[in-house]
Image (spheres, rainbow, N blue to C red):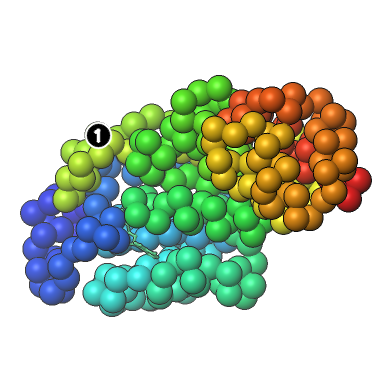
Amino acid sequence: MNYDSPREIKSILGVLGIRLKKKWGQNFLINRGARRKIISLLDPQKDDLVWEIGPGLGSLTHELLSLTGRLLCFELDRGLLAYLQETFAANENFILIPGDVLKTWKDTADKYGIPERVVGNLPYSSASAIMAALVENNCLPSRMIFTVQKELAQRMTAPVGNKNYSSFSILCQFAFSICSHGDLKPGSFFPVPQVTSTIIELQPRKDIALPRDRPLFLALLKSLFVSRRKTIRNNLLAGWAATRFRQDILLKALELSHIDPGIRGEELPVEAFIRLADNLQRLG
Ligand code: SAM
């Protein structure tokens, strides 16, 4: 099929009796140049295990199947699942994982292993939840290429001090180096969404050590942003950390981490969060 033709897409959806749902972010990428760019950035190798999140009608899928080893596709729309199955099932490298990726990815990773590459023009509604689930569970493929809403990409890549820097920035950045590869105008999609999208690349960080105790790091991160206006010291002494560590240990950990207790979480670089979590783990 011609994946660049809204008319053809509309007609296939009509034949299949599929009505697109906004809540599932069903905006198909009809920009051939953008698809080429995504696949070239992904750079899948012959032996790779690749995941595609939300294949839709398969505009990336059919290219990917000619380039890589196994391709696992996560899709939840029944109509699209039937179409994908019929179109690609003859290829023995194609495996369809039906259902909500947020519910199916863990079992899939247990069964097939962590993929080398992950790609997806992610549904706007669940992109941040998908990202968080992967990071929090230490699923760190060697390269991920996603299309996400521009504002989300800005939060993911924001440096400390930037207005978009938040706990979500730290969550993404402690595990991944993230770079943006340019915006896609709404007209690159059908139906045309109301937002601009950005292509982003994520690779596991090699320049800093991961926190020694990941659950502790994640709980600490959440707790230090509970009240954004409060200082680090006050959030530490009044929040989750105080239920787990004595006050003198909390203050000592701040000191050993060279963190000014008077600043707020949004002023603290990722490396300082990791230092604080590691010092708490050591002292606690
Ligand atoms: N990859 C196709 C393309 O670029 O043309 C479609 C991308 S469309 C933005 C997002 C796709 O993700 C849709 O096919 C939608 O049905 C699917 N989807 C949405 N939420 C999902 C979820 N929680 N789990 C699995 N698939 C999901």
Q: Is residue 145 above or below residue 181?
A: below
- Image coordinates of residue 228 in percent, x first then y, are 54, 36
For disc 1, the marked residue is 185
Question: Residue 244 is drawn in which quadrant?
Answer: bottom right
Type of the residue with mark 1: Lys
- Placement of the N terminus among the 4 image quadrants: bottom left
Q: Is residue 189 above or below residue 231?
A: below
- Image coordinates of residue 191 in percent, x first then y, are 16, 50
Query: Can residue 119 be seen in the rendering of this structure?
Result: no
Q: Is 89 positioned to the left or the right of 231 in the image?
A: left
What residue appears at the point 24 percent right and 74 percent down from the top-left corner?
79
Secondary structure under badge 1?
loop
Q: Is residue 73 above or below residue 258?
A: below
Query: Can residue 148 be seen in the rendering of this structure?
Result: yes
Q: Is 241 positioned to the left or the right of 44 in the image?
A: right
**Is 274 or 81 nearer to us in this picture?**
274
What residue appears at the point 28 percent right and 76 percent down from the top-left corner?
78
What residue appears at the point 34 percent right and 51 percent down from the top-left corner?
124
Q: Is 78 positioned to the left or the right of 231 in the image?
A: left
**Is 58 or 123 nearer to us in this picture?**
123
Q: Is residue 13 above or below residue 239?
A: below
